Amino acid sequence: MKLASRPHNFVGTARGLLAVAVLSLSAHAKDLSGRLGMGISNVGGSTTEAVSVDWQLTQATSFEANLGLSTKGDNGGWDLGFRASRNLFIEENMLFSLFVGGALVQEKENAISATGYMLEAGLGSKFFIEGLPNLGFGFRGAFQMIDVDGMKLQIAPIFSSHYYF
């Protein structure tokens, strides 16, 4: 007797696995609830480093504010940005998240300034080294739309480091 095979429902299985992963936070997961992190980050996919403050509102939600200044003579500018993150997977020493953000951006080239904005969204992770539980290192991949003297779309890496108090 031959059994009829049923097609597998991959979408339903993927949704179920995602729900289980998001809802089953480990008791040993890194909990930064209510903690404030201070450090550095880059904004707008630029190489300008920014002073950054990361406030972990709950175990699943955080907000980040950034201020970057560049004093490269006739070329430079500033960035004033924010990011909101939602942690999807929380491991003992690593967090995986979705984020959205934006920034006011001013670029200067040959003493000519242009001001605009940047919007971004993407995926990120933050990890902590065993033995240094308050020092976090982050990496994000962002899809960005930048409008400073003309619209530009790009994919940019974002690196950060924060010490949490």
Image (spheres, helix red, strand yellow):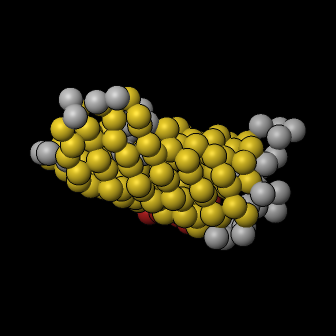
Left or right, 72 with respect to 17, comes to: left
Name the residue at 61% across, 58% down.
54
| Quadrant of the image occupied by residue 127 | top right
Point out the image quarter for the C terminus.
bottom right
Is the residue 6 above or below the residue 34 in the image?
Answer: above
Q: Residue furthest left?
A: 150
Left or right, 40 with respect to 149, comes to: right
Name the residue at 58% across, 43% down.
40
Asked whether residue 100 appears in the rendered view, the answer is yes
| Quadrant of the image occupied by residue 8 | bottom left
Q: Residue furthest right?
A: 131
| Quadrant of the image occupied by residue 128 | top right
Left or right, 111 with respect to 52, comes to: left
How many numbered discs sit on the rendered protein?
A: 0
* Front-lying residue, 45 or 88: 45
- x and y percentages locating residue 116 in the rendered image: 23, 53
* Front-lying residue, 3 or 73: 73
- x and y percentages locating residue 106 in the rendered image: 29, 47
Name the residue at 38% across, 29% down.
72
Asked whether residue 98 appears in the rendered view, the answer is no
* Front-lying residue, 29 or 47: 47
Name the residue at 66% across, 52% down.
38
- x and y percentages locating residue 87 in the rendered image: 58, 60
Is the residue 70 above or below the residue 9 in the image?
Answer: above
